């Protein structure tokens, strides 16, 4: 008997072979969740004529197809993929196995020998109320960790039945900080004054190297025998690090020629692909705020109460503070990494992007208020690995491929991560966290 903290217990023959056992548990779990969704009284109704993207009107199409013990059979995987294609209107030829021509990877990798195979699962739909993402979205995830897709899929149902997730992108800038070598404080001050006097020319030189990047500010910071210059940019729909590296290098060459002081392109002050309080307390990429109210009634499907969740988060906060943790959450890195991998993001940016803070507390109506803040989400929908093969297709499933889509993509990521916090927290409350992963997350060799 396996208990997943939902309104069903699952009886499985423990003598079955591992593949049948794993598929049976997964199928039975999803079957337990196939009750028709309940639309909360506060849920916002979106009319197709009011928005620029597709909204599936027939609620029965919002159930991802499952095929029991044959769920991983080739023909059934193909049926599910075809269903996604028809639902979102995207051709998924590369996800079906059609290869990308080797020459198309030029600029993404050197010494190419092949392509890694990482499975992609589909989750959703999740109801999002953002300034850029409004409606129900399916979210692709690439992972080899069993149970991740199921956990997020369930969380999406829970928040959607309670009216969805509100999301806002509040800050959007990126920075890199070269350091100029000086001998004295006075020498550093001379450079600071010169940069202020010639800022317009420096900005012109930096922006001449890019179509998307805009230099917003240069912040000086004195250090021992050196001067940090923090170049702060907006980067449009691109992730932007390569862009601003080139722009800043060109600008610093101009400064170097004038002040006759050598510079290093990176000082580590911007903590690129690293964790730092400096980045966490400001913004490196996008600052994303998410919130949702999950009703007491809907939470019963996870066999928890708002009070249970609040107690868990309180103990978690105390423990995290004792550990001096940056980013207090259940498992934001898991969902973020799976979306990054599916959608062609720079995986090393997980290092700073995953530092999110989630919270659960009982509101005045006795329901559960859930929030998530991602202070430094670094993503792009153009450039890098976003334009080829499966990565572009996965972005297209969310209608986030190409220019003008990065804030929408950020809002969907934020909503997805919040959904996963709820189900993961509920599993910890009920004691099902280890059992669920043991059942779904163990790829036993034959």
Image (spheres, rainbow, N blue to C red):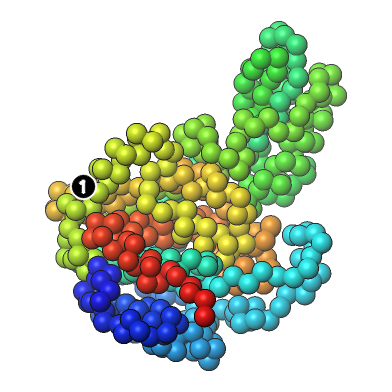
Q: Residue at x 28, y 57 (%)?
A: 428
> Badge 1 is on which residue?
311
Q: Is residue 439 left or right of residue 226?
A: left
Q: Residue furthest left?
A: 365
Give the total of numbered labels. 1
Q: Residue at x 41, y 88 (%)?
A: 69
Q: Which of the 4 image quarters holds residue 56? A: bottom left
* Residue 371 in sight in this render: yes
Q: Which of the 4 image quarters holds residue 112? A: bottom right
- State the residue in front, 32 or 229: 32
Please, is residue 40 above or below residue 379 in the view?
A: below
Quick one: SS at disc 1? helix
The 10 Å Cα crowd at callout 1, few under 14, some 14 to 19, many 20 or more, is some
Q: Position of residue 207 (x, y in %)?
A: 73, 41
Q: Is residue 253 left or right of residue 173?
A: right
Q: Which of the 4 image quarters holds residue 380? A: bottom right
């Amino acid at each position: 008997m396996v208990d997943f903290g939902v309104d069903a217990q699952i009886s499985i023959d423990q003598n079955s072979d591992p593949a049948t056992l794993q598929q049976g548990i997964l199928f039975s779990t999803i079957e337990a969740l196939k009750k028709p969704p309940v639309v909360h009284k506060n849920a916002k109704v979106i009319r197709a004529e009011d928005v620029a993207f597709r909204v599936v009107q027939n609620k029965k199409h919002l159930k991802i197809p499952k095929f029991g013990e044959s769920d991983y059979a080739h023909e059934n995987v193909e049926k599910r993929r075809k269903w996604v294609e028809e639902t979102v209107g995207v051709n998924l030829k590369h996800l079906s196995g059609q290869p990308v021509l080797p020459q198309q990877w030029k600029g993404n990798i050197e010494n190419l020998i092949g392509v890694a195979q990482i499975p992609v699962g589909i989750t959703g739909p999740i109801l999002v109320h953002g300034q850029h993402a409004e409606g129900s979205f399916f979210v692709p995830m690439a992972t080899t960790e069993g149970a991740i897709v199921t956990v997020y899929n369930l969380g999406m149902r829970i928040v959607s039945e309670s009216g969805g997730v509100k999301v806002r992108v509040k800050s959007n800038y990126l920075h890199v900080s070269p350091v100029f070598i000086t001998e004295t404080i006075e020498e550093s001050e001379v450079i600071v004054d010169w940069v202020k006097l010639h800022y317009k020319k420096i900005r012109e030189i930096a922006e001449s190297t890019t179509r998307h990047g805009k230099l917003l500010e240069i912040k000086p910071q004195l250090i021992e025998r050196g001067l940090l210059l923090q170049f702060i940019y907006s980067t449009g729909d691109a992730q932007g690090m390569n862009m601003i590296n080139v722009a800043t290098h060109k600008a610093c060459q101009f400064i170097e020629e004038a002040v006759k002081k050598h510079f290093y392109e990176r000082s580590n002050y911007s903590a690129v692909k690293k964790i730092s309080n400096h980045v966490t307390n400001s913004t490196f990429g996008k600052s994303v705020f998410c919130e949702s109210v999950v009703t007491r009634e809907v939470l019963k499907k996870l066999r928890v109460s708002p009070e249970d969740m609040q107690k868990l988060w309180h103990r978690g906060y105390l423990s995290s503070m004792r550990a001096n943790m940056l980013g207090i959450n259940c498992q934001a890195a898991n969902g973020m990494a799976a979306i990054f991998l599916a959608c062609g993001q720079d995986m090393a940016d997980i290092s700073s992007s995953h530092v999110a803070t989630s919270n659960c507390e009982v509101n005045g109506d006795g329901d559960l208020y859930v929030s998530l803040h991602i202070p430094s989400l670094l993503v792009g929908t153009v450039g890098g690995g976003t334009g080829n093969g499966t990565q572009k297709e996965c972005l297209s499933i969310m209608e986030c491929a190409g220019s003008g889509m990065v804030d929408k993509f950020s809002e969907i990521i934020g909503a997805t991560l919040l959904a996963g916090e709820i189900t993961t927290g509920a599993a910890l409350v009920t004691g099902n966290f280890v059992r669920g992963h043991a059942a779904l997350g163990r790829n036993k060799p034959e």
